[in-house]
Amino acid sequence: MLSIVIHLLCLFALGASTRAFASPVFDQDLSSQGERTNASGGVSSYFFASLERLSRLVDITYCVGTTGIRQPFSCISRCKDFPSLELVTTWNTGVLLGDSCGYVAIDHGASSSIAELPSATHQKVQTDRRTPGVIIVAFRGSYSITNAVVDLSTVPQKYVPYPPVDDGDDVLAKEPEHACTNCTVHMGFLLSWQIARQTVLPELKHLHAQYPDYPIHVIGHSLGGAVGALAALEIKVILGWENTIVTTFGEPQIGNAGFTDYLDAAFSLQNDEDDPEQRTYRRITHADDPVPLLPLSEWGYRPHAGEFFISKAELYPQPSDIRPCVGDSDPNCIAGSDGDTTTKVTSESSAVRSTSNTNTQSSAPWHIPTRLNLWGFFFAHRDYFWRLGLCVPGGDPIDWNRDKYPALKTNDEL
């Protein structure tokens, strides 16, 4: 019954709302990269602008399966924001629990504002610097996300990160550096990737053979974030393509502690002393969004590291509102949210968390946590820089007559 109620609420919200439509592009000014907005944990304007652009790119996925995306890169939504992007393919596997939609696109003249792979040596960006190009793999969220999370959360599936025998690859490119020990993942998320990979991987292999120096950006919202994570693991660990960057928005918990350890190791997320803006996996969460805390930890699911928390509950955030988080379950981020405000968990809970990554949720006094705040599905789960989720002209009323983020002058060419 709970799953039916949540599902109906989510469908009503999506059906009743419209989404943001962007304004014309303005000039590029990325010289502020590396300069933190403030000392309390904000991010640089450069990094903020990169995440904001990626949110618009993932918003475009909601045109797949509805009004569509056409070549060269055209849709009724935000496609015009990215004139140098070329559509390679789209996929749409249906509207069931294992549904997956998205697109693959390429940019042959990408500016460093988004295409450059973060590294330890990455310093200030020169505005005239350009990289060879970039490949985008974008996964759409599911209209049945709540149904998938609630109905299948008690059915974890063993996760073996190796390609099936029918892939045509008799041997791996190299022995994987990381092993997934005692790993389980959400059955619905794994099914979505197993279906999507039949379209995605052949296209990516073809593109990578032609453009081996192009970094691959994997992006996703909601269910698409979970599917994108599984895709990125196969791309990076199994295929051995190191030049892979992942950015997800409102990603649910994917698997158990073993899977979390595996993903953290694969993307080198264990070292909290590294500059968080150089991470190659960025998991963006939002105050009051219940999805990053689902499926429930009581059923064995755990979050992974790489989180950036948007602490401002309402649109529109600023760089100072983006908080780099520490570890898998930072009490100052989504794990410590109680629904209306962000609070620290009890010291006892923090001590337990530091000694065991299996205890990842707050043991604070009983309350209704964000993960059970049903109203979060209406807006918080969709409010990532813009209101994501529907491909319609005109934009959500909340964004009418609104320009792009005025404090950030960026170039939307990738």
Image (cartoon, helix red, strand yellow):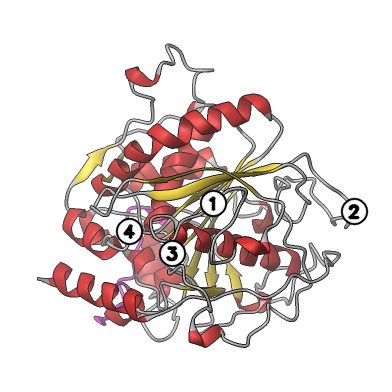
From the viewer's perspective, is 243 left or right of 187?
right
The answer to whether residue 353 of the structure is visible from this angle is yes
Q: Position of residue 92 (x, y in %)?
A: 37, 48
Determine the secondary structure under disc 4: loop
Q: Position of residue 41 (x, y in %)?
A: 65, 72
Tag 1 or tag 2, which sits nearer the N-term? Answer: 1
Q: Which mark is residue 23?
A: none
Kindly identify the amino acid type of the residue bearing the numbered disc 2: Asp
Identify the residue at horizontal 35%, vertical 79% (top origin): 378
Q: Which residue is mark 4?
A: 359
Determine the secondary structure under disc 3: loop
Tag 4 or tag 1, which sits nearer the N-term? Answer: 1
- The Cα atoms of the two marked residues, 2 and 1, are separated by 30 Å
Identify the residue at horizontal 20%, vertical 61% (top origin): 150
- The Cα atoms of the two marked residues, 2 and 3, are separated by 33 Å
What segment carries the magenta color? Answer: 355-372
Main SS, magenta residues: loop
Kindly identify the amino acid type of the residue bearing the numbered disc 3: Gly
Circle 2 packing at 10 Å, graded few (<14), some (14-19), many (20+), is few
- The Cα atoms of the two marked residues, 4 and 3, are separated by 21 Å
* The magenta stretch spans residue 148: no
Instruction: Compare residues 404 and 379 and report the one nearer the observer.
Output: 404
Circle 4 packing at 10 Å, graded few (<14), some (14-19), many (20+), is many
Q: Which residue is mark 3?
A: 250
- In this picture, is 152 found above or below 239? below
* The magenta stretch spans residue 357: yes
Are the two marked residues, 4 and 2, in contact with CB atoms closer than 8 angstroms? Answer: no
